[in-house]
Image (cartoon, coloured by chain):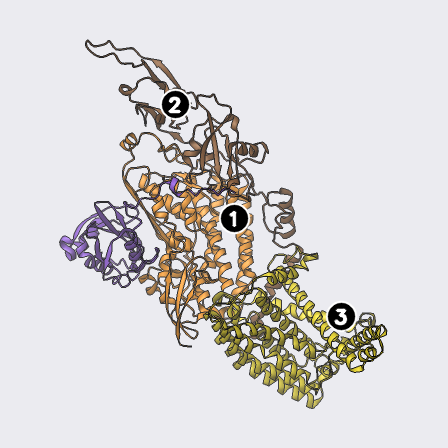
């Protein structure tokens, strides 16, 4: 066979979403790749310009559909900075609760998709099954399983219901046992190691140069985690370790994500204990009119603009399950954000695709891209 | 600080063991699921059924739904037409513009009563409307089965939402605390003509028109038709819906902070 | 790292190319610079201040001018640094950062197609999220979203 | 227990039918229909129809079996709605595929595109003609049935490649290429492993091989050959971990990407026909075919058609093993398969031949912990 381009996507089992990986191959070898994005572009940044600060939250859940909480948290942090508000402490812990459970759910989703990519059939369903328990928890206090709309500028919508913490502990116990099974199914299998060792290697300096963050960067041995480096919410009051591996390949990414789930369980146990001991308000006491319960935006625009909140900008970053997400919110004093800009970690991770795909086989594309953990919703936004 | 996890832990080259570990795990799972697979056979078994949840939890050992709060689920809305005050807040707060206020029978002919009509083709179930509802008459229920044969059926009229209310489904018990609000509706007195529009349309009847002294007419000034009354707003009853601002013909009401 | 430190380290290299360094939430500070001296600034920030990781490039349309902003991260200082430059709307172009930080590549493509800021010497300035040949720049303020009534899909009568 | 054979049943059926027909016909016509040659012809036809129906039914049952087993491995239930425990689900699926439009890509070559799946199906079906199911339940006593079965079995990659090439799709082409490359890697070790069996049994005839196992099944002494054979069969059947030609994650559906409707159903059916054949071959060569060990109570081995019953039990168990492998192992890469084929499986199979030769020479077969068996 001579060289040819093949389109992996936009409808392809490897893509896990809508995108197109154009691959130039010679036989089974990859010579060049060119990711094409934009099939899921919904213009969230543009729509946000026409929405109230709280109404953007509904878009954030849809930004990344497997890590909605992380994006809500990200946006809320920036918006609070831009508007000069602080949430109560209990809300911060609740946000950590959401974030870490979301990290587990997202990593379980990644696990399911990743093992499916290398042909492991049953762990796919094990991952989905256990993720469902976390979604049950989400549903019990937010009322939805994927699109939570739970965090508010200035806090969170409501407190967790009574009995939640006990249930959360049970789920955490169950999940800790399952992680052992996952390792047996993957690491214990020589075929898995044959498939994944020394595959898709991206060394630390390449990661930094190409903006790669998250588990991919930590798998290259760089100990960088915003939760430790620039603690936000309640992370500075919680004990955990940063998962790092050193071989920078697909196996290393697997190990890092597995360890992150274990660390999340560790964090969550502390958070749940804290929540039991410290009742309190979950929403800031005094909020601007358009930030509390949503009030009518109608009325006299002229008067409205006369007494706006001080102009401000908000910039914040959170450690999303996929990596480092940033949001930049510009408040020009009106009731809508003037400009919202998001930095999606997967966006940067995919943009480096040429660095970690070229030179491997066609059959290696699914495991490598699986180990990147692509979520197209947040790439295209 | 934990030491870095090292990835290299080469599996043994023994070809027998190499299949043994994952296959043993799969077989263990097989044996477990012979007793009770994780599947919920949906139309026959429902997650919202507490007896079912407990049964499954016992049979499979999974912490499924033990203490699971199903009532918080954000499903189809229920509307209590009787207590609705037509304040429009649900429609204003909807980020997807799926709520339209439509006239329902029961109001007086001059000022018809308007209640929300929800288009579930657009609704994103964010719950902002029920959070905004000052009277608690628009809530979300646990109903989640919504498939219809025609798109027009996705639009739930107030009567249909009232039917949902009457089925006595578990209502979403979460009430968002209204934060103390520093905003109030203020009056710009020189502009007011005392037309009574705000007081007439106020959904909570919290605006009363009080007489104000009529200033002495200056010589040569043309007599205006000004009614010498002025609205006084009772802040504790006001739900801050802004209806008065929108109906004010002279734009003399505005948002502000009460001193 | 404080804004003053940054200013002190950057000033000798850039001279009048550096406009100001001011505090900025969540970061070590905001460096405002002249767009003509962009490449020098990027090199100085990467090599002298050791901000080796470029996280984000974006642009804002302020109607009369456009602002291009960069966010860099330093592992040593564990801090972000915010760089921004103003370019006139009539000639919105700035030197590409992708020769200094390869990660700028896609971010600049996005900024170009969204806010219409051209990045000179960019290796591959193509459409990223929008289809090829798309004539508009959606994040310009002049690009108005349709009124909701226009967007509404009328239900079919069946 | 050769009281009834499949051929004698169909022969009796044919002659009864034709004689009944002849009795109502006038003289010359009666003579014509009761001609022995006509009877034999009809008997062969009936035989073929029974064989076809039996193999198809078994294949569909096999798919159901896989779906149910795989479901439990994955902590779910498998097909459960159509018929009892979902037994009829596959018929419903087949009906659905049958009703679908058969389409052809614009640039495809119709000749290869249509003949590929048909030939794939036909070759898979032909093998059943030479497989003995129980004593006497086979088409004929050809001396070289084992070789014939394996020869037909290895036709498939050719037809896969034909249909892949003529689909004019890059994914199909890569799948076809992989299929062809894979064949070279696993056919040789399979045949070498079979040589070990032939050495011990002293015959190419499958029936004889089974009778040779009356006293001890071959899986004990020839365990190395069994491992090589099972691994090779997994590759031959294109099942995980060796399903690279249709590796779903990267090649969409591999060589049958462009097929839909009944043509796809042909591929699907033929895949499972081949899985059935593979399981049957394992049973015949290593697990004593329809024979059962002596410690099994006589009541369990002497009822009518007990041979077929136990044969089926063994076959479905062997297939269950394949399903277990599929449920717990990931897919290997092409180069890894080739490496395993050439570097591991061929030496192993040569070793198994050597072991078999030693065993035959020193005549110590029953000493090696094999299961003593008895003919049923």
Quadrant where the image shows the N terminus of chain D:
bottom right
In three-dimensional space, the C-alpha distance between marks 3 and 1, rounded to whole angstroms, equals 47 Å
Q: Are marks 2 and 3 in contact (CB under 8 Å)?
A: no
**Marks 2 and 1 belong to one chain:** no
Q: Which chain is orange?
A: A
Nearest the camera: A92 or A84? A84
Question: Is D123 positioned to the left or the right of D34 in the image?
Answer: left
Q: Secondary structure at mark 2?
A: loop
Q: Residue furthest left?
A: C16
**Marks 2 and 3 belong to one chain:** no
Visible residue check, residue C39 = yes
Question: Is B144 positioned to the left or the right of D6 in the image?
Answer: left
Residue B46 in percent (x, y) is at 61, 45
In three-dimensional space, the C-alpha distance between marks 2 and 3, rounded to whole angstroms, equals 86 Å
Q: Which chain is yellow?
A: D
Residue A340 in percent (x, y) is at 32, 46
């Amino acid at each position: 066979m001579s060289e040819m381009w093949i389109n992996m996507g936009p409808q392809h089992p490897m893509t896990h979403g809508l995108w197109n990986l154009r691959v130039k191959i010679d036989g089974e070898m990859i010579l060049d790749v060119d990711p094409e994005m934009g099939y899921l572009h919904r213009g969230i940044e543009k729509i946000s310009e026409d929405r109230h600060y709280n109404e953007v939250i509904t878009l954030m859940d849809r930004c990344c559909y497997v890590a909605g909480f992380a994006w809500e948290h990200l946006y809320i942090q920036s918006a609070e900075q831009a508007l000069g508000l602080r949430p109560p402490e209990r809300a911060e812990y609740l946000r950590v609760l959401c974030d870490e459970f979301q990290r587990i759910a997202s990593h379980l989703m990644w696990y399911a998709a990743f093992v499916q990519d290398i042909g492991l059939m049953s762990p796919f369903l094990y991952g989905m099954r256990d993720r469902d328990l976390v979604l049950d928890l989400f549903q019990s206090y937010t009322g939805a399983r994927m699109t939570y709309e739970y965090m508010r500028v200035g806090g969170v919508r409501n407190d967790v219901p009574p009995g939640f913490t006990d249930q959360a502990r049970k789920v955490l116990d169950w999940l800790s046992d399952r992680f052992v099974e996952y390792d047996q199914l993957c690491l214990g299998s020589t075929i898995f190691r044959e498939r994944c060792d020394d595959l898709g290697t991206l060394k630390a300096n390449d990661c930094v140069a190409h903006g790669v963050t998250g588990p991919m960067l930590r798998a290259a041995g760089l100990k960088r985690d915003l939760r430790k480096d620039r603690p936000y919410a309640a992370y500075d009051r919680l004990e955990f370790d940063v998962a790092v591996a050193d071989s920078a390949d697909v196996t290393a990414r697997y190990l890092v994500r597995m360890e992150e789930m274990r660390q999340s369980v560790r964090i969550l146990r502390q958070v749940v204990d804290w929540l039991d001991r410290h009742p309190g308000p979950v929403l800031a006491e005094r909020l601007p009119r358009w930030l509390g319960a949503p009030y009518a935006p109608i009325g006299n625009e002229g008067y409205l603009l006369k007494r706006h909140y001080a102009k401000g900008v908000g910039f914040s970053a959170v450690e999303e399950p996929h990596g480092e997400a940033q949001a930049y919110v510009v408040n020009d004093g009106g009731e809508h954000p003037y400009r919202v800009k998001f930095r999606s970690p997967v966006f940067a991770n995919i943009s480096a695709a040429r660095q970690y795909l070229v030179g491997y086989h066609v059959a290696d594309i699914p495991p490598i891209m699986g180990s990147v953990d692509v979520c197209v919703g947040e790439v295209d936004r | 600080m934990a030491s870095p996890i090292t990835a290299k832990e080469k599996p043994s080259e023994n070809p027998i063991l190499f299949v043994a570990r994952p296959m043993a795990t799969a077989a263990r799972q097989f044996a477990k699921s012979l007793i009770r697979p994780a599947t919920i056979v949906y139309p026959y078994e429902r997650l919202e059924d507490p007896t079912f949840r407990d049964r499954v939890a016992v049979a499979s050992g999974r912490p499924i739904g033990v203490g699971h709060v199903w009532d918080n689920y954000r499903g189809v809305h229920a509307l209590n037409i009787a207590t609705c005050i037509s304040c429009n807040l649900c429609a204003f707060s909807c980020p997807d513009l799926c709520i339209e206020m439509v006239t329902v029978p029961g109001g007086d002919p001059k000022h018809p009563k308007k209640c929300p009509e929800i288009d579930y083709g657009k609704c994103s179930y964010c719950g902002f409307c029920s959070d905004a509802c000052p009277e608690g008459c628009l809530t979300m229920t646990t109903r989640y089965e919504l498939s219809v044969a025609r798109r027009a059926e996705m639009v739930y009229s107030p009567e249909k939402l009232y039917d949902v209310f009457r089925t006595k489904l578990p209502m979403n018990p979460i009430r968002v605390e209204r934060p103390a609000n520093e905003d109030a509706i203020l009056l710009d007195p020189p502009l007011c003509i005392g037309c009574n529009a705000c007081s007439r349309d106020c959904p909570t009847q919290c605006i009363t028109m009080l007489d104000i002294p009529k200033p002495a007419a200056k010589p040569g000034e043309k007599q205006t038709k000004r009614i010498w009354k002025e609205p006084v707003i009772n802040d504790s009853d006001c739900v801050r819906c802004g209806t008065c601002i929108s109906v004010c013909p002279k734009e003399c009401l505005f948002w502000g902070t009460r001193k | 790292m404080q804004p003053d430190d940054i200013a002190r380290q950057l000033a000798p290299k850039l001279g009048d190319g550096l406009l100001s360094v001011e505090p900025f939430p969540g970061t070590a500070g905001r460096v405002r610079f002249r767009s003509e001296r962009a490449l020098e600034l990027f090199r100085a920030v990467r090599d002298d201040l050791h901000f080796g990781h470029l996280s984000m490039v974006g642009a804002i349309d302020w109607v009369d001018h456009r602002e291009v902003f960069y966010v860099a991260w330093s592992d040593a200082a564990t801090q972000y640094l915010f760089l921004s430059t103003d370019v006139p709307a009539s000639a919105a172009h700035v030197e590409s950062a992708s020769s200094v930080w390869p990660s700028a590549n896609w971010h600049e493509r996005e900024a170009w197609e969204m806010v219409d800021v051209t990045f000179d010497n960019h290796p591959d300035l193509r459409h990223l999220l929008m289809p090829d040949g798309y004539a508009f720049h959606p994040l310009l303020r002049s690009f108005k979203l349709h009124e909701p009534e226009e967007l509404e899909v009328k239900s079919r009568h069946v | 227990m050769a009281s009834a054979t499949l051929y004698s049943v169909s022969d009796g059926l044919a002659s009864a039918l034709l004689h009944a027909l002849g009795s109502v016909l006038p003289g010359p016509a009666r003579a014509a229909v009761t001609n022995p040659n006509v009877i034999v012809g009809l008997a062969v036809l009936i035989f073929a129809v029974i064989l076809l129906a039996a193999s198809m039914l078994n294949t569909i049952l096999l798919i159901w079996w896989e779906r149910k087993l795989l479901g439990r491995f994955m902590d779910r239930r498998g097909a459960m709605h159509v018929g009892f425990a979902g037994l009829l689900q596959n018929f419903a699926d087949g009906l659905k595929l049958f009703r679908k439009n058969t389409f052809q890509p614009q640039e495809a070559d119709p000749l290869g595109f249509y003949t590929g799946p048909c030939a794939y199906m036909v070759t898979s079906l032909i093998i059943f003609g030479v497989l003995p199911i129980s004593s006497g339940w086979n088409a004929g006593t050809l001396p070289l049935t084992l070789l014939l079965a394996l020869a037909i079995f290895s036709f498939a990659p050719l037809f896969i490649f034909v249909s892949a090439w003529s689909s004019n799709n890059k994914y199909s082409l890569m799948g076809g290429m992989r299929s062809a490359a894979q064949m070279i890697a696993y056919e040789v070790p399979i045949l070498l492993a079979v040589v070990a069996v032939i050495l011990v049994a002293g015959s190419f005839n499958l029936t004889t091989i089974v009778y040779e196992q009356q006293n001890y099944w071959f899986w004990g002494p020839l365990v190395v050959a069994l491992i090589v054979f099972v691994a090779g069969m997994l590759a031959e059947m294109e099942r995980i971990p060796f399903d690279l030609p249709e590796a779903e994650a990267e090649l969409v559906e591999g060589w049958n990407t462009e097929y839909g409707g009944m043509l796809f159903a042909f591929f699907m059916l033929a895949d499972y026909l081949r899985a059935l054949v593979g399981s049957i071959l394992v049973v015949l060569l290593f697990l004593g075919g329809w024979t059962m060990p002596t410690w099994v109570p006589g009541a369990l081995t002497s009822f009518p058609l007990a041979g077929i019953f136990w044969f089926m039990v063994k076959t479905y168990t062997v297939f269950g093993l394949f399903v277990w492998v599929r449920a717990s192992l990931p897919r290997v890469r092409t180069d890894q398969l080739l490496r395993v084929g050439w570097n591991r499986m061929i030496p192993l199979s040569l070793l198994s031949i050597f072991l078999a030769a030693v065993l035959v020479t020193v005549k110590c077969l029953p000493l090696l912990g094999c299961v003593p068996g008895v003919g049923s």
